[in-house]
């Protein structure tokens, strides 16, 4: 089997984690892909990533300043897309139309409509479209999901509550945060940034969403100097919200966040069942990336390490090899392997465009409810019947 020729498209902040994932696979003996190109309008950033990749794979990727130049060169057959949110749909569709398969970092698209456009172009051109979501692929997250859903370690689910309240304003002098403060560039604030991870995992854990009610505020209206595309402007994304998410199973999840409130820092995620509670040991918006500990009704405690060990012992060898290729438990390594292996074998990737759309819709339901001042149905947002928050973004980008 020939190695898949992969291009890294977008060489900013998150691409560093992707490159680390490549290195983890290469060091473990993976020869299923080779990175042949790095693409970014900031050529210096592309050259930096190319040099890092050369150190771990032994060959130097070519550098390109645009996706058009990359496509024209014909040096890659697949692309790992790590550009800012507002460019996901344009970059991904250009690559797909140019004959490349694509894995797109979360969120899949800027809006529901943008996400559907990417999916349509992939289908029309018969290309593999994968969703670059790393959190659910960690050993810690997979094992906690198994403990809750397969083993019913804490019994029947009754309530989930997640809370992250802190005083931590974004640094709008940093290039990594300039575009994150502007609605038309990021699609929204943390509800769909780090929140995209929660939006995916919540549905892995608890199934289909029925209805969401959300209130949100944007207390931080500082100027964002020299933001990409739009120039200096005022920050307009939410920095505070409270959402109640009702699943079709009847389970309710509350989700509260602020980076603009003063006082004692409160960060926790508790998953309550009829026989105990699972406490998330990491950042609440990255469910169980840091592991989880179960406090059971009989007073016993099951550690994160024990949950992981029991999960691994429960897996057949073939399952373990598929979920943790080459023994890697790094979420970024697993997602890129899954992408290139899906291309090589013709199978569906573990997470495709539909998975990205499902996560995107949950995030957008929060925004649409806040704008409407009322609960919204998940299916109405998915089908585009409710889109007041997203419509100005779609109009700005002519989606």
Image (cartoon, helix red, strand yellow):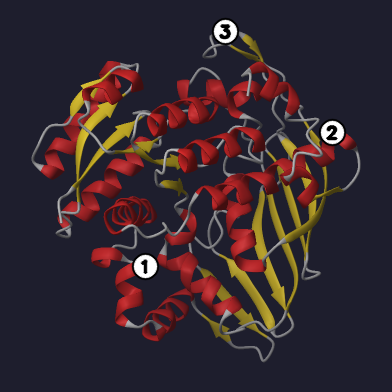
Q: Decide which of 357, 220 is in the foreground and name it.
A: 357
How far is the residue under mark 1 from the one under mark 2?
A: 40 Å
Q: Decide which of 244, 62 is in the foreground and name it.
A: 62
Q: Which mark is residue 178?
A: none
x and y percent of residue 157 in the render?
A: 72, 76
With respect to residue 384, does 10 lie above or below?
above
Q: Which mark is residue 231?
A: 3
Residue at image location 30% in from the left, 34% down from the top = 8
Residue 260 horizontal side relative to residue 212, left or right: left
* Residue 337 picture quarter: bottom left
- Element on which disc 1 rests: helix
- Give the quarter of the figure containing the N terminus: bottom left
Q: Which label lies toward us, 3 or 2?
A: 2
Residue at image location 53% in from the left, 30% down from the top = 85
Evaluate if marks 3 and 2 touch, with contact meaning CB atoms under 8 Å apart. Answer: no
- Give the quarter of the figure containing the C terminus: top right
> Which residue position holds label 2?
371
First in sequence: mark 1 vs mark 3:
3
How far is the residue under mark 3 from the one under mark 2?
A: 26 Å
- Element on which disc 2 rests: helix
x and y percent of residue 275 in the render?
A: 70, 85
With respect to residue 257, does 308 lie above or below?
below
Q: Which mark is residue 323?
A: 1
């Amino acid at each position: 089997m020939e190695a898949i020729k992969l291009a890294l498209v977008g060489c900013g902040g998150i691409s560093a984690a992707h490159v680390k994932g490549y290195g983890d696979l290469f060091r473990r003996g993976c020869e299923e892909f080779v990175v042949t190109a790095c693409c970014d309008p900031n050529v210096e950033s592309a050259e930096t990533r190319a040099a890092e990749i050369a150190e771990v794979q032994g060959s130097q990727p070519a550098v390109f300043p645009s996706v058009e130049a990359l496509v024209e060169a014909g040096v890659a057959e697949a692309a790992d897309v790590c550009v800012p949110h507002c460019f996901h749909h344009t970059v991904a569709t250009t690559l797909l139309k140019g004959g490349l398969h694509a894995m797109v970092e979360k969120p899949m698209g800027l809006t529901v409509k943008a996400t559907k456009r990417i999916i349509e172009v992939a289908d029309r051109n018969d290309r593999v479209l994968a969703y670059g979501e790393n959190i659910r692929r960690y050993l810690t997250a997979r094992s906690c999901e198994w403990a809750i859903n397969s083993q019913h370690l804490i019994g029947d689910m009754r309530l989930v509550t997640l809370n992250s309240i802190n005083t931590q304003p974004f640094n709008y002098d940093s290039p990594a945060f300039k575009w994150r403060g502007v609605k038309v560039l990021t699609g929204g604030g943390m509800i769909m940034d780090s929140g995209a991870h929660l939006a995916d995992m919540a549905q892995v854990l608890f199934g289909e969403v029925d209805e969401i009610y959300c209130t949100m505020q944007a207390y931080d209206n500082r100027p964002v100097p020299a933001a990409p595309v739009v120039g200096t402007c005022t920050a307009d994304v939410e920095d505070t919200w409270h959402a109640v998410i009702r699943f079709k199973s009847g389970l309710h999840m509350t989700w509260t966040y602020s980076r603009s409130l003063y006082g004692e820092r409160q960060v926790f995620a508790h998953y309550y069942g009829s026989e105990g509670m699972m406490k998330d040991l990491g950042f609440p918006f990255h469910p169980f990336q840091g592991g989880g500990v179960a406090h059971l009704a009989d007073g016993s405690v099951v550690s994160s390490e024990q949950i992981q060990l029991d999960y691994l012992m429960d897996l057949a060898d073939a399952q373990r090899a598929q979920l943790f290729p080459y023994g890697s438990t790094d979420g970024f390594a697993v997602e890129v392997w899954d992408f290139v292996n899906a291309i090589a074998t013709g199978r569906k990737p573990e997470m495709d465009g539909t998975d990205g759309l499902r996560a995107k819709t949950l995030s957008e339901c929060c925004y649409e409810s806040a704008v409407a001042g009322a609960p919204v149905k998940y299916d109405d947002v998915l089908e585009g019947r409710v889109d007041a928050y997203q419509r100005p973004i779609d109009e700005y980008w002519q989606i």
